[in-house]
Image (cartoon, rainbow, N blue to C red):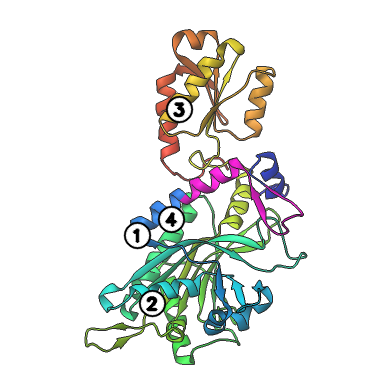
Amino acid sequence: MNDNRDHRPIGRELALFSFRQEAPGQAFWLPDGQRLRAALLDWWRGEHAARGYREVLTPQLYDASLWERSGHMAKYRDQMYLLNGGGPMLGLKPMNCPGHILVACELLRSYRDLPLRLAEIGHVHRNESSGNRNGLLRACAFSIDDAHIFCAPGQLEAEIDACLELAARVHRLFGLEPRVELSMRPAQRIGDDQLWDSAEAALERALHRHGIPHDVRAGEGAFYGPKIDLHLSDSLGRSWQLGTIQLDFALASRFDLAVADRDDGGLQPVIVHRAMLGSLERFIAILLEHTDGRLPVWLAPVQAVVLPVSDRHLAYAGDAAAALRSVGARAEPGGSGETLGARIRDAVLRRVPFVLVAGDREQEQGTVALREAGGAQRTIPLAAAANEIAAAVRSPAVNSGV
């Protein structure tokens, strides 16, 4: 990877996001950046709905007593934003776990309700010092593609397998190769050693079942359980955690979460905390750096631009762009102010996958001159171009732009 592929200049060049001193440690997502996020989240929602996840939305602010109860206050207090407006102390959520457990308390009654898979693009805040902030890679406000699976102990193995299979699909799709770590019990933790033995063994068996090479990190687990972490490197070779699969045999008891089992006794669910992309912002930063901003067609903010040769072709270019939008492409017409060569270069610098040119001949014949990224120009009927582009934008495929 080129060391110059820093996501911040790529983001500026492609007008995806910006950073301003008025909002330290936070990104302003510009229209094309928001298009990218929306496309990624549409894909994420489809993948999770197909796997039985139920999407939720939980609050940003909680009474500080919740974070005391969950144990996060003792672990993360220095990174939390705590507010006191004259009433009870409130905390902006640094993660989504307690909110999802409260939702599970509303929904779970019987063992028949298990497994319950809850998912959320949860916006969280962490008070990162100015020295630790690093664009989208380490921000004070970001979104996590969080999910929590509440299952019976006998269902745990299948749920871990499904998480690992989804993680493999995600990384194949984007052409990424993560480094896998198995993080074991830390010194500061909740739960007894017997539970930790069981949880660590479950994750280790799963990694061996799937033949996944991994490093073991003693003392690096979450305070409630061991975890599998998926790391990717940025343009400078620095490692960043994105996805994670974490086991938790302890937090359910802190929230009195139990369901009726087959014998009308109490069954305490095991909780799997997991994220596939991790921080959405961090994932986008890594993806931009790995691809130098040449995103797969289905993710590109602008997938096609139609350039008129001159002013007399503006109307036809507008109609062609509308035809592409009608088949689902994010397409726009280009202006005619600069030379055609300058406008083509601008589209190439913006990493637009398809550049279409319309002049006299194209307007008369109902065709376009189609240029694909890295390919030669060819003249084809507008309808054929629309079909070809529609097939590319509808089908997420392994990134071919790297």
For disc 4, the marked residue is 169
Nearer the camera: disc 4 or disc 3: 3
**Mark pair 2, 1: CA separation:** 22 Å
Distance of label 4 from label 3 (alpha carbons): 29 Å
Question: Total of numbered circles in the picture?
Answer: 4
For the C terminus, the image quarter is: top right
Q: CA distance from mark 4 to mark 2?
A: 31 Å
Instruction: From this view, report whether residue 97 is shown above or below residue 368.
Output: below
Q: Secondary structure at mark 1?
A: loop
> Mark 1 or 3 closer to N-term?
1
Query: Hey, which residue is sitting farthest left in the picture?
Result: 263
**Circles 3, 2 touching at the beta carbon (< 8 Å):** no
- Residue position for label 1: 51
Residue 286: image x %, image y %?
Answer: 61, 53
Q: What is the C-alpha distance between the residues marked 4 and 1?
A: 13 Å
As displayed, is residue 36 above or below residue 144?
Answer: above
Boundaries of the magenta span = 18-41
Residue occupied by mark 3: 324
Identify the residue under disc 2. 105
Report how far apart the C-alphas of labels 1 and 3 lie in the structure.
Answer: 31 Å
